Image: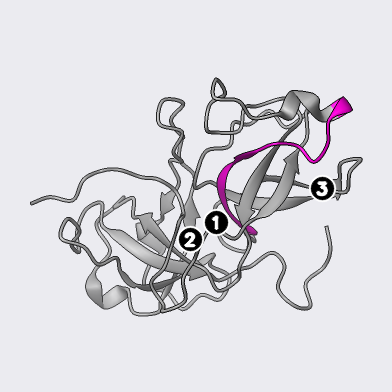
Amino acid sequence: MANANTPMGLRPINDNGVPWVGQTMLVAFKSDNASNIFLGDPLLPAGGADPYGVPYVTLATGGATNKVLGAFVGISNGPAKGANAASTVTRDLPVYRQASILNYGLVCIDPNQLYAIQEDSDGGAIAAASAGFSNANLITGTGSTVTGFSGWQLDSSTAGSGNATYQAKIMGLLRGPDNAVGTNAKWVIRLNLFALADGTVGY
């Protein structure tokens, strides 16, 4: 059976013996950030913080040398009322971050976190022989305002490389009865260019 074409960006998983139970960090999106941010989108520090000390983030950039903080996993209430009362989450809000308003979200920032991600299979699927701890880049995709999920994927054409400037390290195929090596396969990765690694510059 063919793999389903269901990109969801970077989805945190428990696949290394250490449970992931939803630990995240509260972050803020500036009102002049004109991008929708979808569940699974990779984020990057934007520099600065809101009046309550919540750091600003923005959408990461796909491709070599571009660092990643972690995956966006959901919207959140703001840290206080008053000026930030409009950021309160209600059942009528979409699950993704809406563009061009000051709002808040949660990001997984564990540098050792493993993620599941679909390959784009552009130019051919990732071969099993190319997936053993090799590096690859992430590639931008358009998220869905219906499901709220990211459209980012693993750039298949960059897999199988030892290039240290690539964004992700492939840890193997995601195990499951509905996934196999081939078009639209889902892989387990970890970040290779973590934005807050020791010795990196600030933002």
Residue 60, image x, y percentages: 62, 49
Reading the image, the residue beneath label 2 is: 137
Q: Is residue 60 visible?
A: no
Query: Mark 3 or 1 closer to N-term?
Result: 3
Foreground residue, 88 or 3? 88
Residue located 33% across and 50% down the image? 120
80, above or below 153, in the image: above
Residue located 52% across and 32% down the image? 95
Residue 138, image x, y percentages: 48, 55
What is the C-alpha distance between the residues marked 3 and 2? 29 Å
Foreground residue, 97 or 26? 26
Circle 1: element type: loop
Reading the image, the residue beneath label 1 is: 63
What is the C-alpha distance between the residues marked 1 and 2? 5 Å
Nearest to viewer (mark 3 / mark 1): 3
Q: Which residues are magenta?
A: 68-83
Is residue 69 part of the magenta span, yes or no?
Answer: yes
Left or right, 194 with respect to 130, comes to right
As drawn, the label of residue 54 is: 3
Q: Quadrant of residue 177?
A: bottom left
Residue 119, image x, y percentages: 33, 55
Left or right, 118 with respect to 189, comes to left
Q: Give yes or no for contact between labels 3 and 2 (Cβ–Cβ under 8 Å).
A: no
Kind of residue sitting beneath label 1: Gly
Circle 3: element type: loop
Local crowd size for mark 1, using a 10 Å CA cut-off: few (<14), some (14–19), many (≥20): some
Foreground residue, 169 or 164? 169
Local crowd size for mark 3, using a 10 Å CA cut-off: few (<14), some (14–19), many (≥20): some
Residue located 49% across and 47% down the image? 40
Query: Mark 3 or 2 closer to N-term?
Result: 3
Query: Mark 1 or 2 closer to N-term?
Result: 1
Local crowd size for mark 2, using a 10 Å CA cut-off: few (<14), some (14–19), many (≥20): many
